[in-house]
Amino acid sequence: MASFFNNCYLRLLFLRLNTYMGLLIKNIKGLVQVEDDPKLRVCGKEMSLIDTVSDAYLYLERDLISDFGPMRFLDSNPGKIDLLRDIVIDASGKFVFPSFCDSHTHLVYAGSREGEFTDKIRGLSYEEIARRGGGILNSAMKLNETSEDELFNQSMVRINEIISQGTGAVEIKSGYGLSPESELKMLRVIRRIRENAPLEVKATFLGAHAVPHEYSGRKHEYVNLVINEMIPVVASEQLADYIDVFCDEGFFTAEDTERILMAGIKYGLTAKIHANELAFSGGVQVAVKYNALSVDHLERSGDDEIEALKSSETMPTLLPGSALFLGLPDAPARKMIDAGLPLALASDYNPGSSPSGNMKLVMSLGCIKLKMLPEEVINAATINSAYAMGLSETHGSIARGKIANVFITKEMPSYEFLPYAFGSNMIETVILKGEVIK
């Protein structure tokens, strides 16, 4: 309760427009993921390394990280802060992390799909549920019946949820519309989120998420619709940063994916791909061929996929929450890291296969299920996932000049405790763009 009132007091202080100089967090037990020379991504063995500063301070000015270091440096230079104008937070016994970057979500959706959750328990597979009209097509039906305002209101509840859990940047995909009108509705909602929420938002057009009922047996015609009608409008209205395709068994082939990506790239949309969740689809190779920013899922990946990724700048992104929820094999994270690849982690927040945007839990699953070290999952959920969103120059680490997106934990013995305590809420204070949010 005391923490709640302290945070309310801090928010009131921020309302003193143009009267404060900055925000100082002092006596930090551990300042995690610091960089003097920021990197775009971390690969292979380097993923097991994390730079931290013990007994540290962090100074934020407006929406940027201004300075950090050991407390002894701050104490020897008292002119660095102005106690009459700066806000000061004492983080004794606590850790400060850069905010999570969640590079793969579908959190703009209508309603929920807990009925399918029961079907899974009874033994139906993801593909069987989809064939019965469930899955993505179920979400598409609900979304088509939901107004844009209601869709925005539902989505903002989820946005506020993930902010409270430490996420400071999120990529949101369309893909539950599956018609020109509904796909545009989703993307307009994502734009409204970007305009109204304090975290960074990237938008991805995923018209090729599934084939609608009315195009059953006529997938080629639906691909043409995506290419000839949807992409030009999405691009002309500047509604998306990226274009994505669900390249997998029962959805879109590698050939379909190439056609759609080429059309999107022509209109200035950067490629991203869902690949190899259900089968060896060839999606990884397509991603590398078209310089995709990321290729996501990868539960079915072998030597050929790893070899293709080694010669690329595409970020392999794993979604362990989805694999857990669907009972899929775990992606070969250890093999990928040992081969020298970078890895990102993301939540895949969606109503059917991963109804959670909790990146702290995703890190825990990275450790428990994928056998990643705590340092590796921290890198995968911050700097590498920022790369997978095109944001690693501004987000994903504690570096001077980067956006002031951080969170303060509750008292903890070590930074490893964050993924270790998989069921506990250890995030006490959230700061986005230099402002205390929670």
Image (cartoon, rainbow, N blue to C red):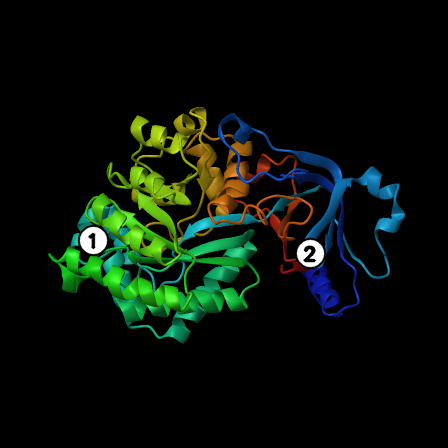
Q: Where residue 290 sits: x, y (%)?
A: 34, 44
Q: Where residue 275 sits: x, y (%)?
A: 30, 43
> Of the numbered discs in the image, which one, if any, rests on residue 139?
none
Q: Earlier in the sequence, mark 1 or mark 2?
A: 2
Choose top left, top right, bottom left or bottom right for residue 179. bottom left
> Of the numbered discs in the image, which one, if any, rests on residue 130?
1
- At horizontal 46% and vertical 61% (from top left) the residue drawn is 158
Above-or-below relation of 186 to 254: below
Question: Disc 1 or disc 2, which is closer to the eye?
Answer: 1
| SS class, disc 1 | helix
Query: Which residue is more in the foreground, 66 or 257?
Result: 257
Q: Where residue 256 sits: x, y (%)?
A: 22, 49
Above-or-below relation of 214 to 37: below
Task: Determine whether label 1 and label 2 are within 8 Å by CB.
Answer: no
- Tell me, yes or no, if residue 122 can be seen here: no
**Amino acid bearing label 1:** Ala
- Tell me, yes or no, if residue 255 can be seen here: yes
Above-or-below relation of 408 to 365: below
| SS class, disc 2 | helix
Q: Which residue is mark 2?
A: 3
